[in-house]
Image (cartoon, rainbow, N blue to C red):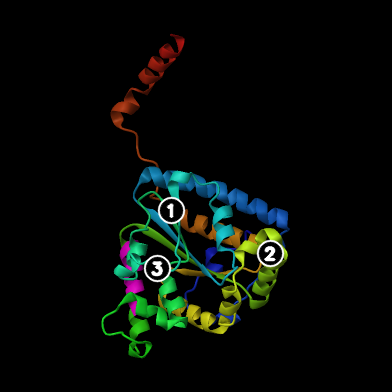
Amino acid sequence: MNNITSQSFVVTNHVKLDEVPTIINTGLTKKKTKNALKKTGKKLSKLQDTMYAHNRYSVLVCLQGMDTSGKDSLIREVFSRFNPRGVVVHSFKTPTRKELQYDYLWRHYIALPQKGKYAIFNRSHYENVLVTRVNPHYLLNENIPGIENVEDIPGDFWDKRFGQIRNFEKQIAQNGTIVFKFFLHLSKEEQRRRLLRRLKKESKNWKFTPSDITERELWGEYLKYYEEAINNTSFPHAPWYIIPADDKRMARSIVAKIIFEEMAKYTDITEPQLDSTIKKNIEKYKEMLDKDDMI
């Protein structure tokens, strides 16, 4: 894992997803990959504790990917060693009736992390330029002025949405939110294998729905719009990382390593200095507690 850095996966130039590999060979065994994640997870947890005490920054991790790309298991494994008070996971599904009474970014604004904490978006605000792009009739639920039918969607509509998303991310970054965006890049063949496992393994049957098949038929469209979204919204303050996801263990380890590597650059994140009065009287407080133990 030493030769893997965040720069290996960050999007800095225009990318074509069909030219980006969905698997990477590091030469590590499954056991070594798992141990690497465990080691990085511990270091991340320690950094998170310090960030919580520092109370100046927050972290937003956005996870996007095709169905079965491993978002849920990645969250479980990468952040399992975090103090529960320091991380909150949000899973964004079809907008509720209440959410549709506001603009499409509202439910994401109110889920942003507090200072000192991580928020994980399992699917994110990017669904609004992906799912609604593939299924534009969903936009009609938003009751946008001037759009009564799909035919009313103006030609520059999606470019404007990209601009709104860029402004959203720029604003939160300028106010202390460190943004990570990961696209779990899965091959269509690997998705087929994972869907088959869901059907063949009884304990996993509940994960399968017929829509998994119908959505799979739209693979090419989704990939095209993912590519467009990534190319329009990857900037230093809110970069996209394309993670090879055919190997779940390796994908988790890479994501953890990227987050740790980038967070370690924030050398100003330190534990707060102890109040001078308290520091001056530490020995006195120790003595008081020692005596209390003898009562």
Residue 95 bears which disc, if any? Answer: 3
Q: Earlier in the sequence, mark 3 or mark 1?
A: 3
Q: Amino acid at mark 3?
A: Pro
Q: Is residue 171 magenta?
A: yes
Q: Indicate which disc, 2 or 3, sits on the residue closer to the N terminus.
A: 2
For mark 1, what is the residue?
118
Q: Quadrant of the N terminus?
A: bottom right
Q: Amino acid at mark 1?
A: Tyr
Q: Nearer the viewer, mark 2 or mark 3?
A: 3
Chief secondary structure of the magenta span?
helix
Which residue is located at x 40 percent, y 15 percent?
A: 287
Q: Secondary structure at mark 2?
A: loop
> Which one is in front in this view, the residue at disc 2 or the one at disc 1?
1
Residue 143 visible in the snapshot: yes
Which residues are drawn in magenta? 161-173
- Sequence-wise, which precedes: disc 2 or disc 1? 2
Q: CA distance from mark 2 to mark 1?
A: 29 Å
Q: Quadrant of the C terminus?
A: top left
Name the disc covering residue 171, or none.
none
- The CA distance from mark 2 to mark 3 is 40 Å
State the residue position of label 2.
26
| Residue 276 shown in magenta | no
Q: Residue at x 61, y 64 (%)?
A: 207
